[in-house]
Image: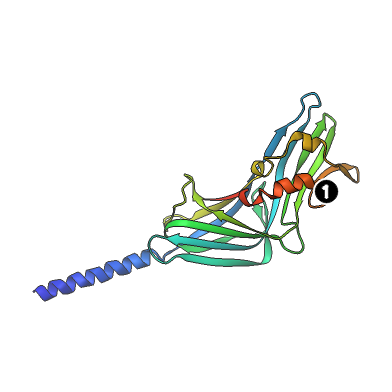
Amino acid sequence: MRKVFVAIFVSMVIILSSCEKDDITQPVEVEFEFSMESFHMEGDSKAASGFDVDEGTIIISEIQFDGRRNQGEDYYFTSDFNSPLMAQMHNRVMNQNVSYDVPQGIYDRIDIHLSLGDSAQFALQLQGRFQRGPLDEVLVDFQYAFKEQINIRARNNQGNEQVVFTQDSGLKAKVIFDVPHLFQFISMKMIQNAEITKNGNASVLEINNEKNTDIFNLMVTRLDNSMRVVFE
């Protein structure tokens, strides 16, 4: 009788262990979404000026996922795009759907690595308007043409690093570009003194590695910390 009890107990342990292993290997669909927080800077009230950046496009050639679990094996993958991912962040429109099956479980840490840019397009382009006066509007065009890898420590919607993936519902990985953070050290005086060029009948304030480089250099030093990933 004792041998039967031991056999039953061992069988139950094996079954429970097998169920637990199955639980932490079941896939959960994670969908990526790209958006942005727009930026506004008040100008001189006498000139009725203002500066806004509310449109943005980002090019992604590769996404890496590095997840560390407290149970089960850590999970890592790299996703290369045959055709680069283009995300219009202001309206959350992408040229392709991006979703992955990730094992469920409790992730103590998730790092997302985004490879920006390709040889044919700007890695990042932000656009807006500079209102120098009631009838004097200048287009704003920030252009970042270099390939870059952005490393982001993901968080849940409470701001904590631990993220729980369950099979009950899919998750969204919301990649958010913080434009105010990128422009934090840019003053209205710098904008007012910036070089303005003509493109046909339009006046354009271009910010890139050749034009208005003082503004450009201040901004690119903040690029690494201008993106965050929130799992919801």
| Coloration mode | rainbow
Whether 48 is drawn above or below 63: the answer is above
Residue closest to the eye, 133 or 153: 153
What kind of element bears circle 1?
loop
Residue annotated with mark 1? 211
Residue closest to the eye, 225 or 107: 225
What residue sits 50% from the left and 57% below the top? 110
Q: Residue 219: image x %, image y %?
A: 71, 46
Whether 9 is drawn above or below 191: the answer is below
| Left or right: where 39 falls relative to 229 | right
Q: Residue 199: image x %, image y %?
A: 89, 46
Q: Residues within 10 Å of mark 1 (few under 14, many from 20)?
A: some
- Looking at the rendered structure, the number of numbered marks drawn on it comes to 1
User: What is the residue that sits farthest to the left in this orientation?
Assistant: 1
What's the residue type where badge 1 is placed?
Lys
Q: Residue 111: image x %, image y %?
A: 53, 58
What residue sits 62% from the left and 67% below the top? 80
User: What is the residue that sits farthest to the top in this orientation?
Assistant: 46
| Left or right: where 97 falls relative to 20 | right
What residue sits 75% from the left and 64% below the top? 119
Residue closest to the eye, 145 or 57: 145
| Left or right: where 227 falls relative to 22 | right
| Left or right: where 182 falls relative to 48 | left
Looking at the image, can residue 130 be seen? no
Q: Residue 228: image x %, image y %?
A: 57, 50
Looking at the image, can residue 87 be seen? yes
